Image: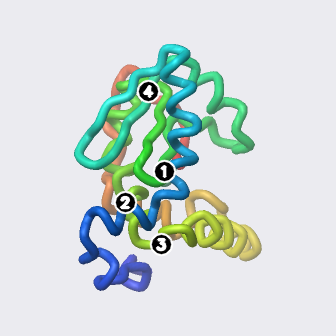
Amino acid sequence: MGSSSFRSPRLSRLSLPVRVLWALPYSLLGLLIALPACALGARLRRHDHTLECTGGRLPRWMQRLPNRHRIVAITLGHVVLAVNSSAMQQLRAHERVHVQQYERWGPFFGPAYVLESLWQALHGRDAYRANRFEQEAYAKGGPFTPGPARMPAASS
Ligand SMILES: [Zn+2]
């Protein structure tokens, strides 16, 4: 199935301030993690209209997330958190697709993502790999480029 059923052309044409506001609840959640992480040694930098936070204690924190995959990067609105700068570089295109999904779905993205995973799991498919949001991110974000920090893992 293509990703066209997930696209809303009208939403994608919204101006940047509107898209940033629409995704703000999740971006604030991302900042709630990124700011203490920075205080404890993580690095925060702006990349286009997205904040990228890497390193510090993020690897330790991410390993505590309830996910059977080892998470190396996660996107919350316009905040992308990654275990290190190498992982960020490898996953940037993938995570950027998730940023666009937050901009499209706004406050509904979280519930939509979870429901989609549940739906796939109920049909005997992998809740992560078969999730259409992930499939769109893998399709548009391209394959991960190999690098020293590559882990046999998933991102969110
Ligand atoms: Zn993903």
Residue on which the image places disc 1: 27
Horizontal side of residue 146 vs 101, given as left or right: left
Q: CA distance from mark 3 to mark 2?
A: 11 Å
First in residue order: circle 2 vs circle 4: 2
Residue beneath disc 4: 54
Q: Quadrant of the N terminus?
A: bottom left
Q: Residue at x 33, y 46 (%)?
A: 50
| Mark closer to the observer (3, 2) | 2
Q: Which mark is residue 20?
A: 2
Which residue sits at x=34%, y=52%? 96
Circles 2 and 4, Cβ within 8 Å, touching? The answer is no
Structural distance between the alpha carbons of marks 1 and 4: 16 Å
- Disc number lying in front (2 or 4): 2
Kind of residue at disc 2? Val
* Disc nearer the start of the sequence (1/4): 1
Looking at the image, residue 62 lies above or below residue 20: above
Above-or-below relation of 27 to 61: below
Instruction: From the top left corner, tell me how far across and down residue 13 is, in percent.
Output: 24, 77
Mark in the foreground, 3 or 1: 1
Q: What distance separates the C-alpha of mark 3 from that of mark 4? A: 25 Å
Q: Which residue is mark 3?
A: 105
Question: Is disc 3's CB within 8 Å of ligand 1?
Answer: no
In the image, taking residue 90 as reference, residue 13 lies left or right, namely left
- 14 and 54: which one is in front? 14
